[in-house]
Image: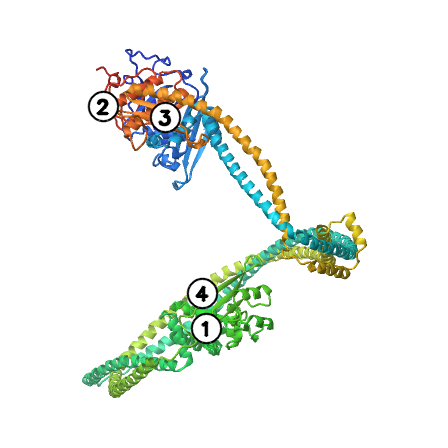
Amino acid sequence: MNRIVNGHRENVDPQTKMTTGKEGVGKKRIGASAMATQKKHQRRGETHDLSDYSAGSITKVVLSNFMTYSSVSLTPGPDLNVLIGPNGTGKSSFVCAIALGLNGKTELLGRAKELSEFVKRGETKAVIEITLKRNSVGGDEVDVVKRTLTKAKGGTKAHTSSAWHINGHPANSSDVDALVKGKHHVELGNLTNFLPQDKVASFAGLSEMDKLLTTEQTVNNGELWKLHEELIDKKENIRNDERRLGRLQDDLEQSERSLNTLSADKEKVEKQQEFQTKANEYKMKIPWIRVEKKKFEFSKIKEEYDASKERLRGCLAEQEIAAKPVQELEVLEHKMGKEYGAKRKATMDAEIKERTALTKLKGLGTTHDDKVGKLNSATRKEKDAEKSVARLKNEIRDYTQKMSEIPEVTDMNFDLLRNLKKKHEDVRKKRIPFDVQIDQANAKLRPAEERVRNLESRQLDLDSVRGKKLKALTQAHRGRIDMTIVDREVRDLAKRLGGNKEKKLKGPILCEIECNNQNNQMFLQKHLGLAILSSYVIDSDQELMGAINNLFKQRRWHLNCNNQTDTSAHERGVNFKNEYKAYGISATLDSTFTAPNCVMKTLVALNGVDRAAIADSKVLDAMKCQEMFNAKLGKIGQVYTNKNVFLEVKSRYNSKSMFETEEMRPNKTTLFGAQIDRADMENVKRDLALANSQVKELRQSLDDIDRQSKALKMQESEAYNAYQQEKARLNKPKSDRQKYESRIRSLKASLELQEANTNQSAFREQLKKSITTLAMQRAQQAQTYIAALDALFATRKEQDLAELKYTDTKIRLMHYKNIQAQVEDDVREVSDAHDEITEKKQRSARQYKEAREQAKAEAPLTDELLKKFEDMPDTEDELLREIDHWEGKARAVVCNNPTAMLQYKKYEAERKDLKEKIAALAPTVKGGQEVIEGLKKKWLPQLENVLNDISKAFQENCRAVGIAGEVKIREPEEPDEFSQYALDIYVKFRSGEELHALDKNRQSGGERAVATMLYLISLQNLTKCPFRVVDEINQGMDPKNERKVFKQMVDSASKPTTPQCFLLTPKLLNGLEYNDNVTVLCIFNGYRPGAGLNLQRELQPYTP
């Protein structure tokens, strides 16, 4: 005997018939020959045949990656199955598997709510497979229900899918419910049939009414429960009908009283209505007069429509005629185009061959000319070499003669030379410290002068409006960019580039704008923003723009420079219209300031200052602004007020527009209204005066040092010249001799080279042979080139002919397309006119129809009404005068209660309606009560008989364990209050006390468990449920009660009518009594100590 664990087959101990693997279920049928209990089924060895199982019984459970199990199978017996194992080994996992595998809800288990919690940790898929016996009369047919739980990617708890299979075929949860509930009568939601571990206390805690309903659901296939529910529903319906009948009778009495009160004013109202009816009759003719007028208008428009339709038909025929030559010429054009393309390709190939031949011919010519040039050069070189040899020999002879004539120096006074050198060095040593002092003085003077220049520039900036604005921009950039330095470097760059580029530079834009109104300054700053106000504009100079942008990039200044190439003058306020004044708009934004034309053009292009406007917040609000945008008065799409900014945002994908409103918040930094910082101005003046005094002192010191240094330099120069003159006098003979010797050596080397060039005859003969060969090759290549040229001319001629044909076809096609386009324009024009007259006709027909329908609704024509119309006037004005006459007479009738007739008719109609409703509802109430009495006679006796049987079985089961018990039905004070019928379970565990109802607050947990288990056993003979599950019902029992309850379960399992039962417990007492109807299933999950014990001997019946 073996089993599968985690995909591997493991051995089973043949002595104990229990698994010795790591996880799984061991099974042993334990018999006792000494027991006299009758066997329910005859087993064959360790197992039962499938025929021993009743319909709906569980024959096998297979789990994969479910809760604590990787892979395990369970084969229960047909009667009582005891699943035993320590806590945490996975007993309740089988209960969960049975519930979920048969489409039970997670709420039944009292455990996790999400299906993902039942998939083994670390796995993504779990499988439950439950096998149910199909029928109870022989055979081995089974139904296999398989459920696969799959976690979603990412492990989301709320997204775990279920896949169902029945007997290997895909199914859904409805199919499973039809099989489990409909066919096998399995009710997992009934606690008397399915009692998991976490719901044991729930049964005792049920109210007496719920206990009765739960019991009714269990016995007789739930028929009593259905009758009970039907009685409750019908009683509630009858009660509602009785209340409704009473209200109707009260309303009828009230209506009778109201009619008696209103009868006095009825006659006056009837007289008034008579006059009003006459006036209404005249009113009824007016709609029909209007109908005739609409009918006449429709007939006129229909005549125009018919004429337009004929014109359109003619135009469409002309369009069809014009399209025919276009289609034919398009085909011909395509054909001519292909022919022209082929000829052009042939010409291109011929051109390639011609260019190749020409290139080769030119190459041969170049090589030939090069060889000829080398030949001439060799001849010239030989003649020049002979002349050079004679010249060089003469020069060598002359220099040798000069060197022999050099005189010797007789006066060699070296002391004078040394004294002159020493004098020069002494003066030089005195001068060098003064050079160091000059460098040090210049090093101090340069920073001081630079500081003076910066302070002077700073003072100018503070004194000017431009400086104020540059300072305001620097503050707005929070010190990241110093706009004063930026402006100075940009303008220096423009000066260096030259070419009048400084005049083309405009910016920053803030410095170019002149705006004196404070509100307009706020609107401009809001609209343009800091980036635009800090940018520069170039008046049509691409080079200057590129240079400035490169400067910005190198210095990492996040600024922009734009090149404006449009030199046309900007017209201010061109988008403003007088219609805008009605909405409080006074001007467009480009009219509120002045700026150079290129700056204005840039702001219009980039920021749309000509499409933004300013308005009075007292006149323009959000609703009125949206109305203005919807009116489409012009191009203005943004409006500024002191309170809000209104924008019209157009969609990129269609013509729709959206309206947005923003609050007008004050700017954090006011750029236009920057003020002079007086303290900063005083500091700059003080620093400038101090820097000027320092520069003056440094320049005076530098001048003194420079005068001394210049005097020493003059002395040094005089001493050095005297030294060099004396040195030259002493070294002249020697230097002249060295110069002549060097010249002679150079001339001799040149002589050797020229003598080698005097013999070039062999080289010239070789060049002549090469020139002859190249001349022959050139002649052959010239013939090849002429042939290629002839072929090129021929292909070009064919190409030109094909191009002429192709061009002629295109011209003809264009001509006919123009004719077709003109015809299509005529068709569109006639079609648009036809559509307009069609729409006009449809509108007229619709108006005629609406007028007719309105007339029918207001004054339906009858023979009597037509006869009355004959005596009435035929014009609307005359009818209106008659109506005024009769309505005046109606108003002359005085009635203190003008609504009396309406109220009278209302109450009269209410009285009639109430009488009809009472007449219809009274038999329903009476008949419903009779139906209830019939159902009650059918339900209550059956319920009493069933509860008597349950009570007898419960008494016997209680007596067998040494306690007393009784089951009673509790009827309410009102016999027809069917929702108040209850079931009382009375138990007594000790002598000397009275029977008490089973209650979670009175009995202990063990006592409730004993009573609950005995009550469930008492229901077994009355239920059609194929199996029952009870999880750890014995946990709270003492050993004595546990033995007694277990014996009752064994005895009950031995009866032929008892369904299959599963009892789960972490332990069993030693010496419990078993028989062949009991299957003990031992749960092992993990390492099992004592694997070699003889468990069969240990599980033998207890003998005192």
Q: Nearer the viewer, mark 1 or mark 2?
A: 1
Q: Nearer the viewer, mark 4 or mark 2?
A: 2
Instruction: State if disc 4 and disc 3 touch (CB < 8 Å).
Output: no
Q: Position of residue 429 (x, y in %)?
A: 20, 82
C-alpha distance separating marks 3 and 2 = 30 Å
C-alpha distance separating marks 1 and 2 = 93 Å
Which sits earlier in the primary sequence, circle 4 or circle 2? 4
C-alpha distance separating marks 4 and 2 = 120 Å
Q: Residue at x 30, y 84 (%)?
A: 686
Looking at the picture, which amino acid does disc 2 mark? Gly
Reading the image, the residue beneath label 4 is 759
Which sits earlier in the primary sequence, circle 3 or circle 2? 3
Which sits earlier in the primary sequence, circle 1 or circle 3? 1
Q: Nearer the viewer, mark 1 or mark 3?
A: 3
Pointer 2: residues within 10 angstroms few (<14), some, or many (20+)? few
Which sits earlier in the primary sequence, circle 1 or circle 2? 1
Looking at the picture, which amino acid does disc 4 mark? Asn
- Which of the two residues, 966 or 1095, is positioned nearer the viewer here? 966
Instruction: State if disc 2 and disc 1 touch (CB < 8 Å).
Output: no
C-alpha distance separating marks 1 and 3 = 82 Å
Disc 3 secondary structure class: strand
Reading the image, the residue beneath label 3 is 1029
Q: Is residue 315 above or below residue 13?
A: below
C-alpha distance separating marks 3 and 4 = 128 Å
Q: Residue 890's image quarter?
A: bottom right
Left or right of residue 350, residue 15 in this image: left
Reading the image, the residue beneath label 2 is 1090
Reading the image, the residue beneath label 1 is 522
Looking at the picture, which amino acid does disc 1 mark? Met
